[in-house]
Structures are given as structure tokens and as C-alpha cells.
Image: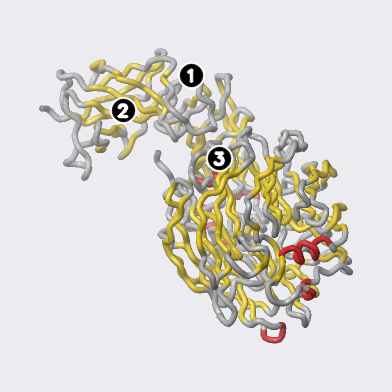
Amino acid sequence: MGRVKGILFLLWWCAFAWPQSFNFNAGVAYGVQDNPVATATADFNADGKLDLAVANAASSSVAIFLGKGDGTFTAGSTVAVPGGCVADNVTAADFTGDGKIDLLVVCGFQTSVWVLPGMGMGQFGTPIATNTGITAVEGYIDINFSTVAVADFNRDGKLDFTTVTTSSSTYGTNFTLDVFLGNGDGAFHQGAQIDLGETSLANAVVSADFDGDGIPDLAVGLVAAKGSTNSTVIVLRGAGGGAFQQAGQFETQGLVQLGNMIVADVNRDGKPDLVIASATGVTVNNLQANITTYLGNGDFTFRQSASEFESNGIGELVAGNFRGTGTIDLLEELITLSSSDLAVSSIRMTMRAGNGDGTFQSPSPISLPAGLSPWWFAMAVGDWNGDGLLDLAFPASPSSASFDSSNFTTGKLAFSEIVATYDEMPPGDLVVMLNGLTPPLAPSMLPTITSVVNGASFQPGIQSGSWVTIQGTNLANTNPGRTWRADEIVNGNLPTALDGVSVTIDGKPAFVEYISPGQINVQAPADSATGPVNVVVTNNGQVSSAVPAQLQTYAPAFFVYGGNSVVASHYPDYALIGNPAAVAGTVAAKPGDVLILWATGLGPTSPATPAGVTVSGTAADATSPSTTVGGVQVPILGAVLTPGDAGLYQVAIQLPASIPSGSLAIQVSVAGVLSPAGVVLFVAGQ
């Protein structure tokens, strides 16, 4: 598919300054149970509004808050997690494969994990247990462990997760990074165990596709043995089947100890980068904290970019487009330690505006509610009020309460001591703070649609489930443009938004494959209507005027390259067909050849294939198409949707012996509807 990269947004960016200050409204507190320490956000009741879940470690429960869409929440159910679970980590995703959001709860310093199966109405069913037999080291001791990463590591369509574990009952020995593979029913089984060595602890794990092969990879931050001044980050290549191979490593500036490691595309090149909070010094008096950006090269290697120093320990980092500029900003949680070196005495938050090149500006303070102390590793962000800007939520305890780890015994600390300390914490609150900024978007910068055309022919006429190209200005803030990532396709379901950009066709959400300021490519949603329908683009809360497009039962079109050459592959070597004298690397078609043509808009399939999901298996065309080349009817050997893709047909033909030579007109017809004229196939004589 042709892709246009607009320059209008880039010119405007240079001339228009976005605000660098930040403003969050006063926090609203919602009461929860004892020691809230983790949050997750998703749409639990399928009403199109984000909800929140809060894990209460000391109460062994998860509290649900249902979003109203205006930034306020209604208290929902509180779900008990069995077995005295120290609910230290909660992740929202579909772990049971029924299309409803579930909650994965990892019990810190214990041997069980639980999935709370979503019922789709904001309620959750009977918890599903997995007894790992080994202790999950997840949560805060004297360093923070944030090692739960969720992805489909073995590519079986079922979500898996990682966590650091130990077979010991005490803290300090026998650590491994474990992969637990999903069964698809909410339970898990043991996958790969990655030995990290006796002298290192993994306390930060993130997942992304670092080499662009569509398989999730891992980056692991290792805290070295006492006496070391630096940590090591190892990068593990996903080898398929849930296995991993080390593909790279680098040292950090200081220990990844008081903070964490996050993954984001901070320089907007389409490759995942790492932002790492680390510290040098081991006492309050000589603590030096810093935030360092490592830019990904797309091949498991990273190059160091900006490094920013802080006078306090860095408790947590969150990356997000908080200003609505299309660039990544950093939300920082900064902690001050007491003289014990272990207890946290105060917490504050700041925000650094991103420059879009991997560097960040000086921090701006964020005012926190009086009398409440945030738990220092549990921030969540989302657009709670639908204004296109990210808001903030976090669990908090009374400021008079203190998680005092200084009373841990020395030597081999028993995990039971850690659990007991969690259990001492009192009830707390969920605090929600709405983003107070208004994006300074001038009226002329609103998204504007200039055309809606078939994604193959670039001519009018679109079909339900076919590829559609939308052209215009200010359609997205992402520049250069990008396609969807593999991790944005969850269980075969295609995304309906990328970087805050969404599209509706006839009021129904389309499935967004590519965005840029000047062009968007989408798969049209399922729709039985025909005739004029409205197309609307929303770019981070800014809505375009509706533009009509002609929705048809059939809208056949071949994909083309070089202006008018049909995209055709020679079978079985899949060489691109073309005029070798004009296009290097192509081969000419010859009489008798079997060719694969690539098309969209060939109508419904049998069995029916819904829009918005990747194709598994093959689905034959319900209305058999016919094809002519140079005015000659050619046999069609088959027309099927491409497995692993969406809305993309493969049409196999065999050129007859009598086919003439030259650049021949080629068209496909379905139920009497012809594809646009002007497309050619180059055929050479025998």
C-alpha cells in the first residue's frame, strides 16, 4: 500500500511552541482497603470508558472503580484474592480468551498467582489459581522489584507473563527469571527459566519487539552484588515458542536500584527505547540518582542519549504524551530516604517535557494532596475524562503511616517478615488527578480530511472489511508516520487507535493500521449499509468534520506499485512481476505462469470473516471473481484471504498460452463490479 508522509505538521511544529509547564487538578480520593500498592486501568464493563483496579496487599483484595467518562468514578465491587495473597502487582488483559478484560494478580513473596476472570459488566468471577511452587520476588524490600511483563511470548494467541522467582524461603539466593505460559483459560504452566547467576538480581523487566521481527523480546535490569557501582541491562531475543536468547547487554550509570526501567519510543523513530532510573551511592548522604535514555537501534543494541541527575531517589517513571504534543514526556516519582537507608520519609512528583529527540527538559513540580503519601511504585495513567490528555491515578496511604523496612532482620531475610510488614499498613485511598492542560491547537490545526479512497486503487468506493486510505492534514501528531506494532494486536484483535488517533466509518470504529499527519490507512468495520457514509478522524481529542465516502457491497481493486503496475508475485518463488528493463529486481510474467495477485474489496467470504481480526486459516471468496488480462479471460485458481493478515486477498491465476505480450491491462470483476481501469501486468513472450 502506498504511504504518504506529510510535511505540513513538521513545518507547523517548528513555528508553534507547546507549553512546557504542567498542571494537574487537585486530587480526588476514593477509599480502599489495607495497603493499596498497585493499579491497572482498562474498560472492565465495556462501556467505552476507562475504569481502574487497585490491589490492596494487606487485605488480599482488588477494588474496582468504574469510570463515568468525566474524570469521576463509581466504587464497584471489591474482589477477594484467596490464600492470603499479598496482591503486589495487578495487570489488566484478556487471559481467558473470551474477549473480556481479566485481572492477573501476582502475590508478592509468595508462590501463587491468580486470574480474576472478567464478566464484561465490571464484575469478576471465581479466581483462577496457578501455584508456581516457587516464590515470586515482586514488590519492595530494600530495592524495588518490578519484573512482571505480559505478552504472548510463544505466539500461540494466549497471554504469558514473566516474574523473578526463587526456590528459597529467604531473600538473597537462587534467583531466576521465569516465564509462565498461558493455557488460555486463566491458568499458566512453567515455561523458560533464565538463570541470572548467583551475584545478580533482576529487579526490572520490560517487554517490546526490539528487532522488529514481530516476536516479543525482553530487557532485564540486573542489580549486581554488593560493592558494584553499576548495573547491567541484558537484552533477550524472543526466539519463538517462549524461549529466549541473549542478544545484547550494556552497563548503566549506577545501580537500577531505587527506580525502574521503562520502554517507550522517546525519539519517534519507530524503535523501542529504554529509560532507566538508577543511583550511585548506598547511603542517604552520598546518594546520586539519575535518569538515562538509551535509544534503540532496532537490532538489540542501544546508544546512550540524555542523562539527567536528581537529588532524590527515583521511585518510579511513567512515559506518556501528557501535553498532547505527540512526544513522550516523563512523570517522575521522587523519594527521600530516612537515615536508616531503608524507610521512605517523603515523596514528591515532577514532570519532564520531552523534546521528541530522546532528551527531556528540566522538571516541573506537581502538587500532591495533603495528608496522603503515594505508594512509590504504582502510578497509572489514562484519559479518564475523554479530553485527549493523559490523567494520573495512584494508591496512597495516610502520610502518618510508614512502610518501615528498617526493622527487617539482617542476614538472610525471611519472606514471611516482608509479608508481615506489608500486613501492618492501614487502609488507604485511590487518588485521581486530572490533567489541567488544554492542548494549544489552533483552529487551522484541526484534522482535515481531503479524500477517502480505496486503499489499493486510491479511487472512490470502499467496502466493509476492505482497506481504506484517508488523506488530509493534521490527521495525526506522529511524524514520521508508523504502522501498528505486533504488541498492539492482542489475541488477533486489531487496534482501533494508534497514538490517540482513531477513525469512524458510518459511526463505527475502524481498525487503524498506519498513521501520519497526511495519511491514515484503516480496515473498514463490518457494516451492512450501502451508499454514502460519514468518515471522521479524531486526533488526540480533536475531531475532524465528517466527509462522505461511498460504501459498496463490492469494491474490487488490485494493489499497485510504480503508479500503475499490479502487485503480482510469480509462483512458487514469489518474485515480483514487472518489466526488468524498467524496474530492477523484477521478472516478467510468461504464458503458462501461475501468479499471485494482491487485492482488496472482493466481497464477503464463506465462511464469513469479521473485520478487525487477523485471518486464521483460509476463507474462500463467497462470490467467485473473474479476471481479464489484455482483454483475455484467465483462469482463477483460487481467491482467499491471506492468513495472518486482514482484508487482504490473494488471487491465484494462470496465464493462458495464448496471452499476448507487453504491458497488458488487468481487471478483476465481482458480481458485475469491475476494478478501476489503468492497471497493467507486464508479460513477455515465450
- The circle on residue 158 is 3
- The circle on residue 607 is 1
- Is residue 659 placed above or below 418 in the rendered structure? above
- Which amino acid does the dot numbered 1 rest on? Pro
Q: Earlier in the sequence, mark 1 or mark 2?
A: 1
- What residue appears at the point 75 percent right and 37 percent down from the top-left corner? 126
Which residue matches tag 2? 678
- Is residue 217 placed above or below 154 in the rendered structure? below
The answer to the question of whether label 1 and label 2 lie on touching residues, with beta carbons closer than 8 A, is: no
Q: How is the image coloured?
A: secondary structure
Q: Which mark is in front, 1 or 2?
A: 1
Q: Residue furthest left?
A: 686
Residue 658: name its quadrant: top left
How far apart marks 2 and 3 lie (CA) works out to: 45 Å
- What residue appears at the point 67 percent right and 70 percent down from the top-left corner? 143
- Which amino acid does the dot numbered 2 rest on? Gly
The answer to the question of whether label 3 and label 1 lie on touching residues, with beta carbons closer than 8 A, is: no
| Closer to us: 290 or 356 | 290
Secondary structure beneath dot 2 equals loop
663 sits to left or right of 305? left
- What residue appears at the point 25 percent right and 32 percent down from the top-left corner? 572
How far apart marks 3 and 1 lie (CA) works out to: 24 Å
117 sits to left or right of 79? left
Q: Residue furthest top?
A: 672
Residue 241 visible within the image = yes
| Closer to us: 158 or 3 | 158
